[in-house]
Image: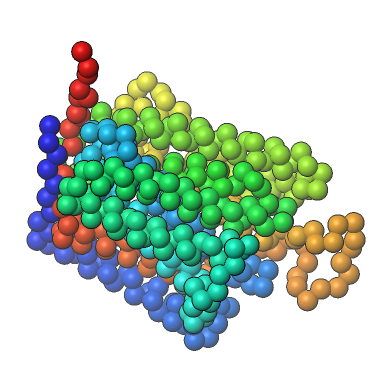
Amino acid sequence: METNFKTIEGKSPQYYMLAAVLALLILPGVYATWVMFQHGLYHSGMTNRIPWGLQIILAVFYIGASAGSLVISSLYGIFGKLEYKPFARIAVYLALWFLIAALLSILTDLGRLDNLKSSFSHFNFLSMLSINPFLYNMYILICIVYLWAMLKEKEKAVKVIALVAVIWAILVHSGTGAIFGFVPRELYQSALLPPSFISAALSSGTALMILVILLLFKLTKRPLDDELVVRLGRLLGIFVCIVVYFLFVENSYRVYLAESREAGLHFLSLSGESGVLFWGGLVLLGSIVPAVVLFHPRTGKSIPWIAFASVLVVFGVLCERYLIVIPGQTHPPDLFPGMEIVGSPLAEGVVHYTISLFEIFQAVSVAALVGFAFVVGLRVLKLAPTEARLHEQPTSA
């Protein structure tokens, strides 16, 4: 069965209202970024001890969502699964904009926008912060070419570019994980962070794609086979289990080592913020509950339950990204093992980070921009299929 793609009409009052609301939501973030550029980052919740805040958390989340979205397109582009072809173009388009959102989040976190040029004018092979801008720029270019090949229906080119795109997405997220994993601090340093980042990217990207697909087909009133969503739900359940495995191994190793045991136990303690987010947000709500829902014989075949599980997975990965970025800064680093620091210009001990209103404005602004680009893209480009039916794969004699 051939899959036909068409633009949406986009002439209803509801469409214009949605586009207008998304456009207006961009403005507070622009204002907050301008204020920080003019007067300084003290308007945010960041301090000398906490140089990475909400925008870096969301940047890591968007990068993961981008890489995870490409998995859906690769099911068709690489493995030839025709039943996933209706979602392939949407997945690539969102992957492109998710990475742009990540770069905008990093840009708003800089404070001084004129410092951006140093990321491109200097290169250091020993610095992941220097390597990653190259990976990001090439990733955007690959996504553009990949989307062009799909829109032009160049099937041979799609298969080749799909493989390149997925490999590069793995490199991008491995590089992002290495930014944290290669830092010699108790709650950062871990060789497992790059693959752990990838597993969380697969789960968050798949969960977001399920939610986008359900919402898009419902609002445009286009036929969608429930079995396709059920299959994506099963795939999401597998990804969630992989995330749990990496969480168990990484934190067991952290507590096992004497030099990181104190920090690891503090991280997992229910008496602290990180422990509550880890056990309540990430493990229970973000992993165990969705896995039970997705693998249960009844709820795993229910579209509302699959959507509910997808929302929980997205929430859990957001908790995971927060737990990667913030606790490693709030917990004091052991800079001089076996020695006591009696004087320092920086605050010693465990510090706290509180998200400011300006950071929330910036976060909403970036998310609104992605939403605006998506609804406009649906009207301009042939991204949405007229229907999504389950294709029967041909069998050999």
Query: Does residue 38 appear left or right of residue 341 in this picture?
Result: left
Quadrant of image for the N terminus? top left
In terms of depth relative to the viewer, which is nearer, 271 or 43? 43
Q: Is residue 280 above or below residue 378?
A: above
x and y percentages locating residue 19 in the rendered image:
22, 64
Q: How is the image coloured?
A: rainbow
x and y percentages locating residue 217 in the rendered image:
19, 44
Observer able to see residue 251: yes
x and y percentages locating residue 110 in the rendered image:
52, 74
Quadrant of image for the C terminus? top left
Residue extending farthest bottom = 38
Residue extending farthest top = 397
On the image, which quarter does residue 227 sit in?
Answer: top left
Residue at 38% across / 48% down in the picture? 164
Query: Does residue 99 appear left or right of residue 263 in this picture?
Result: left
Residue at 49% across / 78% down in the picture? 117
Q: Is residue 211 above or below residue 297?
A: below
Q: Is residue 303 above or below residue 11?
A: above
x and y percentages locating residue 269 in the rendered image:
70, 45
Residue at 20% across / 22% down in the picture? 394
User: How many numbered marks are there?
Assistant: 0
In terms of depth relative to the viewer, which is nearer, 290 or 169? 169
On the image, which quarter does residue 214 sit in?
Answer: top left
In terms of depth relative to the viewer, which is nearer, 194 or 223? 194
Observer able to see residue 384: no
Q: Is residue 129 above or below residue 226?
A: below
